[in-house]
Each structure stands twice: as C-alpha cells, then as structure tokens.
Amino acid sequence: MLTYHLKTQLLRLMNTATHFRFTKNDDNPTVKRLLRAVEPVVDDMPCLPVLGIFQENPQIFALPVVNARNEPVGIVERHAFVETFIKPYTHEIYGKKPIAEFMNQAPLIVSSHTSIDDISRIIIDAGMQHMVSGFIVTEHGQYAGIANGHDLLDEITQRKQANLFYLAHFDQLTKLPNRVLFMDRLSMAIAEASRVGSQIGLLFIDLDKFKHFNDSMGHAFGDQLLIAMAGILTRCSREMDTVARLSGDEFTIIADNITGQKDLDSLCWRILDTLKLPQQIMGREVFISASIGTVIFPRDDQDANNLLVKADAAMYEAKRSGRNTYRHYTAGMRLYSLDRMSLETDLRVAIERNEFELYYQPQVALDSGRVVGKEALIRWHHPQRGLLTPIHFIEIAEETGLIVAIGQWVIREACRQHQAWLKDGLQPMRISVNISAMQFYQSDFCDMVEDTIHATGINPSYLEFELTESMFMQDADAVVRTLRKLHGLGIKLAIDDFGTGYSNLSYLRKFPIDRLKVDQSFIKGIEHEPVNVEIVKTIAALARSMSLELVAEGVETDVELHWAESSGCTFVQGYRFSQPLPAEKFARWVAEYKHQVNQHTLGDM
Ligand code: C2E
Ligand code: MG
Ligand code: MG
C-alpha cells in the first residue's frame, strides 16, 4: 500500500504543482529562477588566481568577468580555460596576464526579466557554445548572477512534463481531471477502500438538454455552461472528493469514504438544489438541471469500469424518470455499453431498415375527462439492443445531423397514422410531434412540412409541433418568420418542458404560441414540494393571461392529478392515464377509456 500512498501524494503534489505553474503570473517564469550567485572576477585579475578559483570550486562551470563598475564584460568557461593550463610552461607564460585576455568577449547577457521561453530561443539562436558556457544575467545593467544551460534544459523539460501531465490528465475547458485521471483516481480509491474496508460513492452526472443550449446559443455559451457546472459540482462536493469531466456534458464525482447511501442522497440533493437557482451565463439568466446516477463500492460492484457502467445505467434511469433527479443503481437496471460509435453507425441505416416506430401517449382534457390529443414519441427497434427510447439516440442523432432525416420521417409517419385512424373511425384529435432545434433551423423546414401536409392530406389544425424554449433564443427574426409560416399553415405550436430553460419569458409575447407543457419535474411529487405548486400556479396564471392552453406532463398518480388540476392545468398527460403505446394498442386504449368515461366521472377512475 505504500505505492498507493506514494502515488496519491505524488498526484496531489503534481496537481498542486501544475496548478501553481498555470496560475496567471507564473505562466512564463523569468530567468531569475535559474540564477546561481557566483562571485564574479574583475577584468584585470591575473589568470592564476582565476585558475585557483576553478580548482577550489569544482561546481563552478564558468566565471563571469566584470569591469570596475560591476558590469559584465566577458565569461571564462571552465573546461577551455583549465585545459590551457594543463600544458607545460603555461603557468609561467600566461599566469600573470589579466583574465580579460582569456575570456570570451561576447558572452550572452540578458536582463533578469527575460522569460525562460525567450532565453531558450536566444540560446538556440546563439549556438551551442552558450549552452555550455551559460549566460550572464544583469539587474539594471549590473551583474546579478550566472545561469547554466543544463539548469535551463531541466527547467524546460520539467515544464514540458508538467504541461504534458496537465494536458493528459486535465480537461482544458473546466480545469477538472479528465477521464484518464478519473479512472486512475477511482482505481486508487478502490485499492485503498479494499484495504481499510471503507465504501466509495460514485456519481455519474449528465446535464439535461445541454444540446439544446449548445445549438441555440452557440458553443461559447455551451462552454460557459460547462464551466459553471464544474464550479457547482466542485462547491457541492468535499475537498477530498474528485470531480471530473468525462466528456461532453458528462461529469463524475468520486466520494471517498462514505458511510452509505445517505451520504450520496445528501450530495445529490445539494447538487439538484443548487441547480434550482438561475445561472448567469454571458449576461443571460438560465436554468440548468442534471440527471444523476449513483453506485457504491463494494456493494454494487468492485471493478472500476463496471462501477462506471452501472452509474451510467442509473443516470439513464434518472433521465427516464423525467430528468432533474437522481437514481441509485439497483440490480437489474439495463446496462448500456458506452459504445457510441456503433450506435451511430447503426443509426445511419435505421430509417432504410424501417427500425423506427412511433408510440402515442394520450392527452386528456380535465374539464371533460376526454382524450383530446396524443403525443407521438419515437422508438427504435435496434436489431441487437432491443427497444430503445429517445434518451439513447436522440442526442447522437442531433450531433450527427441525422435528426433532420429522422425528424422528417416522424412528421410524415405521424400524419399518415393520424389519417389512417380517421379512416378507421377513431375520433379526431390533435397529434403532437416533437421537433428538434436543428430540424427547425433547416431553411427548407416549412416547405418540407407543407409538402407532407399535402402528401398525407392531414388537416393541419390537428397537427401540433412541440418546440423547446431554447429555440426562441437565437436569431429572433428568423425564428419569428418560421413560427408565423407554420402558424399560417394552421399548425398549433406548443412549448415543451416549459419552465426548465430561460427565466426571461418576454419571448412568449412575441411568438404565436398556443400551448405550454409544464415540465414533468414540477409535477413529480408536487404534493411534497410547495415551491413547485407555486411555480405551476404562476405558469398557469401566465398562460391564462395570454390565452394559452396548459398541459401538465408526467402525471403519474391521483395525487399529482389533483394538484395539477388545482394549480390550474387544463390538460394532462402521463402514466396515470397511459404509457406511450404502439399505434394499434393506442386505438384500443382510447376505445376502452371512452367506455369508462361514459360510465364514471374522471375522479372515480
Ligand atoms: P418529451 O417530449 O417531454 O416527452 C415526454 C416524455 O416523458 C416521454 O419520454 C414519455 O414517455 C415520458 N413520460 C410520459 N408520461 C410520463 C410519466 O407519467 N412519468 C414519467 N416518468 N415519464 C413520462 P420518451 O418517449 O422517452 O421521450 C423522451 C424525449 O425524447 C421527449 O420528451 C422528446 O423530447 C424526445 N423525443 C421523443 N420523440 C421524439 C421525436 O420524434 N423527435 C424528437 N426530436 N424528439 C423526440
Ligand atoms: Mg414532447
Ligand atoms: Mg416534455
């Protein structure tokens, strides 16, 4: 275990050293760092005493020569000088001559303010000789010391190494440890915990909807968001914990030496609570949220890689439960290998192979208790991985641009299905389709939609597009044009996941919007969260004042249904009524539900 401690200490040391080196003032240290205070000799000193100095001080590699005013005038290099005096009679011939005749009269002289980077360039340009003899440093023109090529080399290599270490182990953007250092720290922590019998908690944290921010606000904004997130995670964890950035918007925390699940609960809550406050990013106020998965060593696994995969699975579970929450890993959670590449390859051929299917989730009007709409939600029948929900592929589809083709398929398929149902005699009701930012920003988006409407024959007033708040933040003119065109076609427009994006809602007045969908994170457990009741009530008041319809998403229980209704929501959607269903099952569900409503009032159901 000595190695463990040593390695920890070393890493700690190196980390502090690198931080130290990378602070602003120390970015480019000066030659002062290399100075050796060698006593100079004066130019009229005879050679013999100089030889004596060299012989008595074997560590002196060169002697600076100064004039009476202490200004450097030359340098005597040990090797060449001592060599001369080994030959016979040289003592007698040269011993009494002044050193000025033997010195190198063109020494390299630099001011003490010269940076190490500059002096290395000067030395390289001046030739190898100066590497050996070194160079003289002055302060206000006066001799201040002498420095040596070897020390310079050492310094440069050390800095290079520190720099390389830094590049290899830290994320440049957030300055947090990267995946390499994270895995290393996790393995070390596991070794130590096995030795002393302690437990380690591991958090896998993924920002919700980071992609939307990045797309609509630009990468510089996305970067600032990640930096803010890094700061929040660091402040929420203990000093001894490791906060790392794995990639993109994925972060991890290693919480050493925890007493159990409770510690992780409070850490997760600290993070989620902190995220409830709006963040100031580039002059804008935004809300960010995250989904967190946790595992515990040794309970859930003993292997570093497996722990990460399981924490990732738990994080997906948190996303599936509506994001902005955390989940502990439990046996049986589905594990996904983090193999994005193959998923991306498969996604490219999924449309041709007809692997996508739309599921439909009913929306119920609270006043009548009737089904008045359905949201189309995409599913992917992956040939090896089975049925995948959007969490596992929408982001990749967005990053690769495949979302444009997939989104087009979704609109067409939703319209086709809607028409097929009408033909089969299903009651007419609205059909909502989710639209990605990238799709929305395509210059031919409106034309494509118009073509689809004509091709399928759908009455556009039944079609609704669900957009996200972040789409309204970019280039407002172009956005307004697209929205007006869509609205002009008769399509309804809704804002999905409302309340999670921007705190500045002035855009609502500018745009032709019909509905708001209150994000499920406000509905989940609303009875225990008085703040959420207030938020939903405020959103409801806002919606009423602007004549917008209000849908509560993610209603799972009767209690949530009650609170959603009493807080002012007029429509609801959620597992309380039905999970998203394949087309055929959906039609059967609607028929069955209608039957029940005719017999009971909604409250009894
Ligand atoms: P969303 O538009 O907010 O859809 C609601 C999500 O909440 C759906 O997840 C739905 O299955 C889930 N949900 C509904 N009721 C409940 C409930 O009572 N409890 C809980 N815990 N969850 C509930 P799903 O189908 O996994 O979709 C996730 C997200 O993927 C959607 O969020 C939407 O943003 C995106 N998405 C889905 N289909 C498409 C699509 O065709 N195109 C695009 N661009 N995005 C899509
Ligand atoms: Mg939606
Ligand atoms: Mg939603």
Image (tube, rainbow, N blue to C red):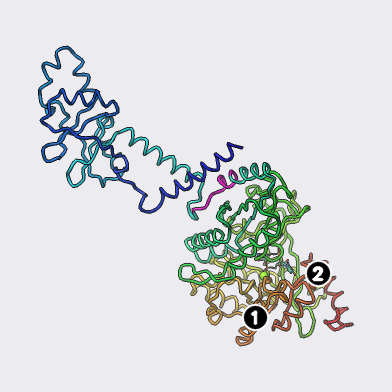
Which of 349/386 is in front? 386
- Which quadrant, please, contains the C terminus? bottom right
Bounds of the magenta span?
175-184
Q: Residue furthest top?
A: 88
Mark 2 crowd level (few <14, some 14–19, many ≥20, 10 Å Cα): some
Question: In the figure, is residue 16 to the left or right of 470?
Answer: left
Name the residue located 76 percent from the left edge and 80 percent from the top edge: 562
- Tell me the SS state at disc 2: helix
Q: Nearer the viewer, mark 2 or mark 1?
A: 1
Q: Residue furthest front?
A: 56
Kind of residue at badge 2 = Phe
Tell me where residue 98 appears, x and y as whole percent.
10, 26
Q: Is mark 1 within 8 Å of ligand 3?
A: no
Which of 273/540 is in front? 273
Label 2 sits on residue: 586
Report the predominant secondary structure element of the magenta stretch.
Answer: helix
Question: In the figure, is residue 346 to the left or right of 332?
Answer: left
Magenta-span inclusion, residue 369 = no
Name the residue located 66 percent from the left edge and 57 percent from the top edge: 393
Question: In the figure, is residue 122 to the left or right of 240?
Answer: left
Q: Quadrant of residue 262?
A: bottom right
- Tell me the SS state at disc 1: helix
Tell me where residue 351 appears, x and y as whole percent.
68, 56
Label 1 sits on residue: 534
Q: Quadrant of residue 102?
A: top left
The answer to whether mark 2 and mark 1 are in CB contact below 8 A is no
Tell me where residue 576 appears, x and y as whole percent.
79, 72
- Which quadrant, please, contains the N terminus? top right
Kind of residue at badge 1 = Glu
Marks 2 and 1, how far apart in space?
A: 34 Å
> Relative to 559, does residue 48 appear above or below in the rendering?
above
Q: Earlier in the sequence, mark 2 or mark 1?
A: 1
